[in-house]
Amino acid sequence: MARKVFIAVLGTGFYGKCKYVDQNKGFVSSETRFVQQATLEYINAKAWPVGNSDAIFFLTDKAKCDNWNESITERRNEPYFGLQGILKNMSLPFVPTEVHIPDGKNEKEMWEIFTILFNKLQEDDELYFDLTHSFRYLPMLVLVLGNYAKFLKHVTVKYISYGNYEARDTTTNEAPIVDLLPLSSLQDWTYAAGQFLESGNVEKLIYQCKTSLRPIMAETEGKDQQASALNKFVCHLQTFVEDIRTCRGMNIISANTISKLRTDADNLGSTIIEPMNPVFEKIKCRLMSFDKNRNIDNAYAAAKWCQDNEMYQPAATILQEAVVTFFCLRHNIDIGDYDKRKIVNKAFKIKAMNTPEDKWDTLYKEILEDVLSDEYLLNPNLISLFSNITEVRNDFNHSGMRSAKIPMEPARLKKNIAKCIDGFSILFHNEFNCEYKENQLLINLSNHPSSKWDSGQLGAAAEFGEIADMPFPDIDANGDEIYIENLADEYANKIRQVSEGKRATVHLMGEMTFTFALLSKLQAAGITCIASTSRRMVVDDKPGHREVTFQFVRFRKYNV
């Protein structure tokens, strides 16, 4: 279990008595001259585990003489008791530790103080800082120390307090105790966002969600909309990054996650930490090169994104497969058919090596001839670029350990990737891709019109293009098999008419015998059919009342 540690620097001032309060949490401390006493009460240090907690007070010689020693009973002719004795009377589960520090008059002493503080920390400590009496630069030093120790000793900063004695209410003699932890949180969020913007690394943002947002969501039972929206955005951002890092081409092209991210971004509004709003705007801007609808351009954008974030092996893999997919789409080749995808690779190789027709050796000669006739394959520069990116990809995949090949130096690998990404831009963001995207159609043949779908289902549906609702027929319970067969024929014809000239997918959900009959006819016609899956949610909110809802999970293809 992590050790709980309170840390404070004791000053030399003559402190007046008051009660420290946090009106938001209804806290009122004992009347005290020392904010450290009030803070220990506030964080309930009395309940900390025996043997696994501590309070460390950093003292200069003068602070020890003026404000610490138990022997102090008077100052300026007034009763005035040292903090050491006061702490003894608090029944704390630890004996406070006193640590001598220099006055910090110069840079050498500043680093000496920093080292002394750091050396008192242990791995995985939970830290509670009080900055009230930290003189000169010490508040900044403590904040820097916190971040430094987070990295090297995996500590967690749980609380940072400041007792504002000067702002006390003179009528009640109560002074606010201010939580400065949001300043540390802002640093953490900024660092995490910076890592994503600079390198595509999303792990720190996920960690911030776990440590900062999810406790808020648990405490409010998910009712804090800002925390929930930001958590959802970062989780989808993680999926987006993982798809690219692991070269999940189908996911990238389908734009399922990027569509959700765009929806999340629209719902994000102001974040829970207001100064982070401009930072998250920058993150949103980085996603603008991706289309929220199904589009091959997303694969090219992913390759470029990898290059920008120095993820060179995924950049080469995704770019090469993006080019192959581009030609598959142009020539009506199933982009998921591995054997037919090889036809595109073969076409480039034939062009590059001027292979005679009698040496082609392929089972799909008609498809190959069609690809070879493509106007883009008349461009020798594109042939050279494809050979280049294929060679780069192979060099990566074999770690440069191919006996017949001289491995490329890192600088050459990066230069070739940049050259290929720039050269292949001619294939993407053009009229063909817009036509491909706009040519998609999802026919919703079910009892649930798309106008009633939630954002998750609509986001997933974006993969299949524009949605056209077709109401499910009212099936006569007395109808026989011939009735079902005729009705299925009728709807198969309707679907063919609606989908003419489109790449159609049918969302088919309803009465089982009709669904099966229609599914058989549509699959025979080469039309893809999908079903939606959902999770059943049951809430017994009061005696005798049960509320059942269904939460969309995913679309699933009917197998042939």
Image (cartoon, helix red, strand yellow):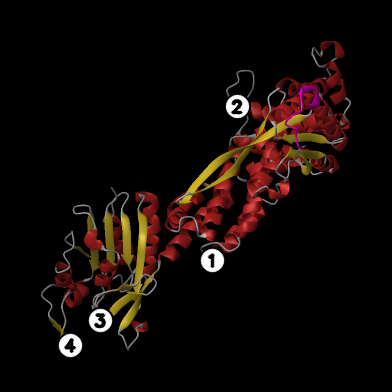
In the image, is residue 111 part of the stretch drawn in magenta? no
Name the residue beneath numbered marker 4: 76
Q: Secondary structure at mark 1?
A: helix
2 and 3 marks in contact (CB < 8 Å) = no
Residue visible at 62% across and 53% down in the picture:
264
Amino acid at pointer 4: Arg
Residue that badge 1 annotates: 274
User: How dense is the environment of label 2, judged by Cα within 10 Å: few (below 14), some, or many (20 and up)?
Assistant: few
Task: Give residue 278's position: percent from left, percent from top.
Answer: 60, 63
In the drawing, what numbered circle is on residue 397? 2
Q: Nearer the viewer, mark 1 or mark 4?
A: 1
Which residue type does callout 2 highlight? Asn
Q: Residues within 10 Å of mark 3 (few under 14, many from 20)?
A: some
Q: Position of residue 304 (x, y in %)?
A: 68, 43
What amino acid type is highlighted by mark number 1? Glu
What's the distance in space between the residues labelled 2 and 1, CA to CA? 44 Å
Mark 2 or 3, which is nearer the eye?
A: 3
User: Looking at the image, is mark 1 or mark 3 earlier in the sequence?
Assistant: 3
